[in-house]
Image (cartoon, rainbow, N blue to C red):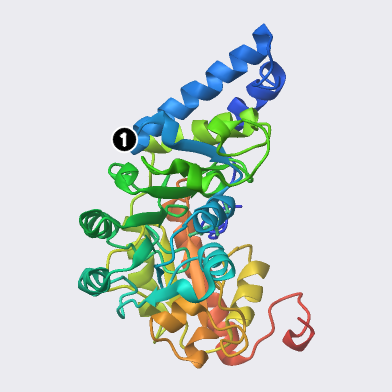
């Protein structure tokens, strides 16, 4: 699908990942905990991959736990916090952070506001840290809805000097941006399907000290005892093959996205880009359209072969307010008009051009009240 612009939701499995998976299921399907030669070989391969991932993070392999993805990792983090102090989350965290934290820690959870740009202000965090009694700070590396990048390096430094643990949800960062320095965060969660790996595979980076607190899934002694359950070696091998390609430099650049935003503004009068003032991932545009509900846009764009999303704000901002959009000060009316465009490494300039034309065509149809060709009436959709 050349018109696939929903990579922040999930990505197609890369060729390298597919090959790695195929080879693993054919040759290395044995249980890595087994006590025979073939199983030992899988165990060694698994440990090699752990070392490779640790190298990308710049941390010890003992800190890496392979798991089913970022939701599992985020749950393990909040289950393990301990203590009795406050836990600070940014107002734009993913539901797997927000909901896990509030379910497990209730009133201990406090929100750290973001500025209009969608980024946490480091001075605000420093003020909170000075007040004391904080057991964990959780601020993602980059936001799934807007692509807004958080100052995670500075946040990590502040937390380190205050002696407070820092968790960084890296699901949208890893595989898109350089991983250097991310291992300095105490806890990092990530997900393979966001960068060309299969779904249901991911990782959690554990802290240097007190790792046992974050042992998530109980069971056998796999993953150093921090996560019971037979490892999905083929899935892990595929995820690592996908990541290896990204780390080798095959990450995208913002040029095409920038071009698209400028052109779109000139063709669809009044369109606005959320978080445009600050640093964003190279692949994401959260647009506020000037008119018409986002579901109408999505349906018509889909009819033309383009897959986009609303982020998490659905058709009516009022019924499904996006906490991210709310935190960034959008009104309900605007929330009902947001559309997220998220590209991938395989997206080419021609795909962006085609998307732009589709936007222009849909804008024309919606403004003139014209029905999309061969489709049902909008009331039926
Ligand atoms: N955190 C962020 C920022 C995400 O974008 C996602 C996926 N939408 C997750 C966590 C959950 O990841 P997974 O699908 O691996 O559970």
Nearest the camera: 232 or 20?
232
Classify mark 1: helix, strand or loop: loop
Q: Position of residue 21 (x, y in %)?
A: 63, 29
Q: Position of residue 76 (x, y in %)?
A: 55, 52
Nearest the camera: 171 or 215?
215
Horizontally, is 306 left or right of 381 in the view?
left
Above or below for 32 versus 263: above
Which quadrant does ligand 1 occupy? bottom right
Residue at the spot of label 1: 58
* Residue at far front of view: 84
Nearest the camera: 296 or 310?
310
Question: Which quarter of the figure has residue 233?
Answer: top right
Q: Position of residue 334 (x, y in %)?
A: 48, 88
Total marks shown come to 1
Residue visible at 47% across and 63% down in the picture:
144
Q: Position of residue 348 (x, y in %)?
A: 45, 50
Residue visible at 60% across and 79% down in the picture:
314
């Amino acid at each position: 699908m050349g018109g696939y612009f929903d990579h922040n939701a999930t990505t197609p499995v890369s060729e390298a990942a597919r090959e790695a998976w195929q080879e693993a299921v054919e040759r290395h399907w044995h249980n890595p905990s087994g006590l025979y030669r073939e199983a030992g070989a899988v165990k060694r391969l698994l440990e090699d991959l752990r070392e490779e991932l640790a190298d990308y993070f710049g941390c010890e392999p003992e800190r890496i736990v392979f798991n089913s993805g970022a939701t599992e990792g985020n749950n393990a983090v909040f289950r393990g916090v301990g203590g009795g102090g406050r836990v600070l989350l940014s107002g734009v965290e993913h539901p797997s952070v927000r909901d896990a934290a509030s379910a497990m820690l209730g009133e201990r959870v406090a929100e750290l506001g973001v500025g209009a740009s969608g980024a946490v202000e480091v001075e605000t965090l420093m003020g909170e840290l000075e007040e004391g009694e904080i057991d964990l700070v959780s601020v993602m590396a980059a936001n799934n809805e807007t692509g807004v990048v958080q100052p995670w390096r500075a946040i990590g430094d502040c937390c380190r000097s205050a002696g407070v643990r820092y968790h960084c949800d890296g699901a949208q960062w890893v595989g898109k941006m350089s991983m250097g320095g991310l291992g300095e965060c105490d806890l990092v969660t990530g997900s393979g399907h966001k960068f060309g790996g299969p779904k249901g595979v991911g990782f959690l980076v554990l802290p240097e000290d007190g790792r046992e607190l974050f042992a998530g899934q109980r069971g056998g002694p796999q993953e150093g005892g921090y996560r019971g359950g037979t490892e999905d070696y083929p899935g892990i091998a595929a995820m690592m093959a996908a990541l290896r390609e990204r780390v080798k430099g095959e990450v995208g650049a913002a040029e095409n996205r920038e071009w698209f935003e400028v052109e779109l503004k000139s063709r669809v009068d009044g369109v606005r880009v959320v978080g445009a003032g600050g640093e964003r991932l190279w692949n994401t545009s959260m647009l506020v359209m000037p008119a018409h509900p986002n579901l109408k846009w999505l349906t018509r764009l889909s009819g033309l072969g383009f897959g986009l999303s609303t982020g998490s704000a659905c058709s009516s901002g009022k019924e499904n307010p996006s906490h991210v959009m709310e935190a960034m000060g959008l009104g309900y009316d605007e929330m009902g008009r947001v559309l997220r465009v998220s590209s991938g490494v395989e997206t080419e300039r021609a795909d962006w051009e085609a998307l732009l034309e589709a936007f222009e065509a849909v804008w024309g149809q919606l403004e003139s009240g014209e029905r999309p060709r061969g489709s049902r009436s909008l009331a039926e959709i």
